[in-house]
Every structure is written in C-alpha cells, then in structure tokens.
C-alpha cells in the first residue's frame, strides 16, 4: 500500500513538472510576477542587497522591491496586479534562465512596465546565447500609450539553444540611483510561423498570431519598430516606423474581426508592412478594415494604404465607442515583390485627460488576384 501511494505521488509530481514546463513556453515565467520576494534580511529599505534574493531571478545594480501602494514623495507607485513589482534603478538588471525552449524557434518576451521618473527611461532587453550581432533591444519608455500608468512591451527573438538566459537591464546612470522603470509580469510565448490562408496572399492578415497578452491587463502590448527588434513578435509583418504599434485583444477592446488587431498609435511614425510575391502586370485587390478600439480615441482619423504605385486614403470618423468600415485598394503589380504598407496620417490622444496616444485600428487584411479587372 505504501509503494502504491509513492507511485501515485511520483505521477502527481511528474504531471506538475510537465505543467510548469508548458506554462513557461506560453505564459508567465517562474515568479514572473515577483510575488515571491526577498527576506527582510536581504533588503535595505526597498533596495534588494542579495543578488539571489528574488526566487528564480538574479539581480545586479540598484534593484528595489516595491509593494503595492508604496509612495515616492507625493507619487503613488502602482502595481498592476498582485502585491509586488521590481524597480530597476541605476545600471540595474534582472535575469533568469529558461530551460525548455526549442533551439531555432521564434519567441516573444512580453512584460509590463511603468515610468517612475521625469527623465527619459530606456530598457535593454537581451537573450543569450546569441550569435547574431547587435541582436538586443533598447526600448524607449518615454511616451505613454495607456491611461493606467502601465504599458506592455513585447520583444521577439530567435532561440539559439534549448536553454537561454533572459536579461532586462536599465543602462541609465542618474543623479538619483533609484530612478528607473517598474517591471512586473514577464511572460514568454512560442510564435508560430503563419501560413498563407486560402484566398489570402498575406501572412497573418488577421493578426491572430502575435505576442502574449496578459489576460488581466487592459492596455494591450506595444510592438517595437524593426530598428529596435530584428525579429518581429508579429509574425509576417514588419513594424516599419520609428515608434511602436499596439497589439490589442477583443477581451478589452473593439476588434473588427477575430480576437486580435493592430492599433496605429503614433501617427505617421507608426506603420506596418509586409512584402508579398506578385506577378508583374497583374491586378490585385487589397481589402482591409479600419475602425476604433472603443478606448476614448475620438476624432477624424485617416489611414493611408500603399501597394504598387497606388496610395489609398481611408477616412474614419471615430466616436471612441467602437465600430469599423471596409476599404479596398486595387493596384497593378509593378514588380515581382510588392510591399503593402499601412500608417495613420494623424496623431491622436485619448479623450480621458490622460495624455496617452491612441489611433485607428486596422484588421482583417486580404490580398487577392483579380481575374477579370
């Protein structure tokens, strides 16, 4: 009987181990919400003094362990969910090892952050081992895109081993060594290589494949431009601009089709593009939806779509309460490879006095050949 109980216990432990391994690949990293923290003896005030005090993480530099409701002067330091987050101060970093990734596969790393200082803040994100030169992201955190004080970023990378080390580093050296971003909720997701669906020459035209979105947050995920991230966490697409675009979900926003869409949040500095094989001289139709995310983004919006030598400008009047319209651009391919590109002509801010940027939503993009134009 004792041996039988031991056998059952071993099976339970085995399945628990399997569940942990699976959750790492598509969800929160172990202690990725920092709810497991240091002991009192491993801290001096809010500063963590032991490099291994936070379970599953190794720290260096000026790292603080922040409790929800804690204040800095007159400013409340928010924590999006749970009781704790970390703040990366002067030359501070946190890193962790992940052992169950697949070498040669693409992943997205998503995390929540909030600014706590007046100075410009940046975060260096990297994964090792890595044989690609300059394959790291220096993500700017000056512009605010959400009304909650928190934003999410996603960074894409190619795993080059079955065990990797993920590092988030604040390179700034400021007068106040505690100055730096709050970090909470760090997750990993394996990205699928999307195939072109029947009746659509575009890959991932409905944006259903993309980075991990934290289920209990309401601000979407920022995807950085390709100048900051060579491996886009939005499969099939390039963020061909100077600033990020926002990946949004139907659980928290109005989405024209399916469960995911893209919000172009930074005017002409926020663009997406894809290169498609075409037949020179053949006529094609590029069809897509334009709308708003029902997030208090109001006003006269204008989407510009480019394909071949044709530009289509699609106006959309937003009341900030959701809705969309369909548009079609007909063009003749002038080369064997055609770049389709979308951007927002104007800058927009939410009508909630938060000062956060927003913009039109694009979704359900389809490219088809026209037999009898």
Image: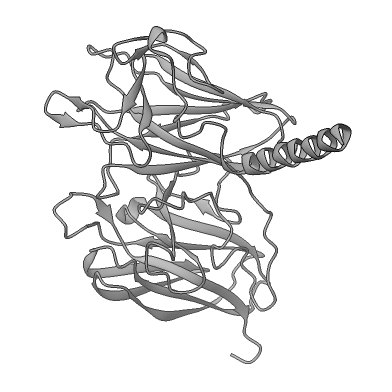
Classify the position of the C terminus by image quarter. bottom right
- 65 or 297: nearer the viewer: 65
Q: Is residue 263 visible?
A: yes
Residue placed at 81% from the left, 36% from the top? 5
Give the farthest residue toward the front. Answer: 1
**Is residue 115 found left or right of 189 in the rendered image?**
left
Relative to 346, residue 76 above or below: above
Relative to 98, residue 289 above or below: below
Residue 226 horizontal/vertical position (percent): 50, 43
**Is residue 59 found left or right of 303 in the rendered image?**
right
Residue placed at 40% from the left, 7% from the top? 41
**Is residue 284 found left or right of 117 in the rendered image?**
right
Colouring method of the image: one colour
Q: Is residue 228 visible?
A: no
**Is residue 256 found left or right of 331 in the rendered image?**
left
Quarter holding residue 66? top left
């Amino acid at each position: 009987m004792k041996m039988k109980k031991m056998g059952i216990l071993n099976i339970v432990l085995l399945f628990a181990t399997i569940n942990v391994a699976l959750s790492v690949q598509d969800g929160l990293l172990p202690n990725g919400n920092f709810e497991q923290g240091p002991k009192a003896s491993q801290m001096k005030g809010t500063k963590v003094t032991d490099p291994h005090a936070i379970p599953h993480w190794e720290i260096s530099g000026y790292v603080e362990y922040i409790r929800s409701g804690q204040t800095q002067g007159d400013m409340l330091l928010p924590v999006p969910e749970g009781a704790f987050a970390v703040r990366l101060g002067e030359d501070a970093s946190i890193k962790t090892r992940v052992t169950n990734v697949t070498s040669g596969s693409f992943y997205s790393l998503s995390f929540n952050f909030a600014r706590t200082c007046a100075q410009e803040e940046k975060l260096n994100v990297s994964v090792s081992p890595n044989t690609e030169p300059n394959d790291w992201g220096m993500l700017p955190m000056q512009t605010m895109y959400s009304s909650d004080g928190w934003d999410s970023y996603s960074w894409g990378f190619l795993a080059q081993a079955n065990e990797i080390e993920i590092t988030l580093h604040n390179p700034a050296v400021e007068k106040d060594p505690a100055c730096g971003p709050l970090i909470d909720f760090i997750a990993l997701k394996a990205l699928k290589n999307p195939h072109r669906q029947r009746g659509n020459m575009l890959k991932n035209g409905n944006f259903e494949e993309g980075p991990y979105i934290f289920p209990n947050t309401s601000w979407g995920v920022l995807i950085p431009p390709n100048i900051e991230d060579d491996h886009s966490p939005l499969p099939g697409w390039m963020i061909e601009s100077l600033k990020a675009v926002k990946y949004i979900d139907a659980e928290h926003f109005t989405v024209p089709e399916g469960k995911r869409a893209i919000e172009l949040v930074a005017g002409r500095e926020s663009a997406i593009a894809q290169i498609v094989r075409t037949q020179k001289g053949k006529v094609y139709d590029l069809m897509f939806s334009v709308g708003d995310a029902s997030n208090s983004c109001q006003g006269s919006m204008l989407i510009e779509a480019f394909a071949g030598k044709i530009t289509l400008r699609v106006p959309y009047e937003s009341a900030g309460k959701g809705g969309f319209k369909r548009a079609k651009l007909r063009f003749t391919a002038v080369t064997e490879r055609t770049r389709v590109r979308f951007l927002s002509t104007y800058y927009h801010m939410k009508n909630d006095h938060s000062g956060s940027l927003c913009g039109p939503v694009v979704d359900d993009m389809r490219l088809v050949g026209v037999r009898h134009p």
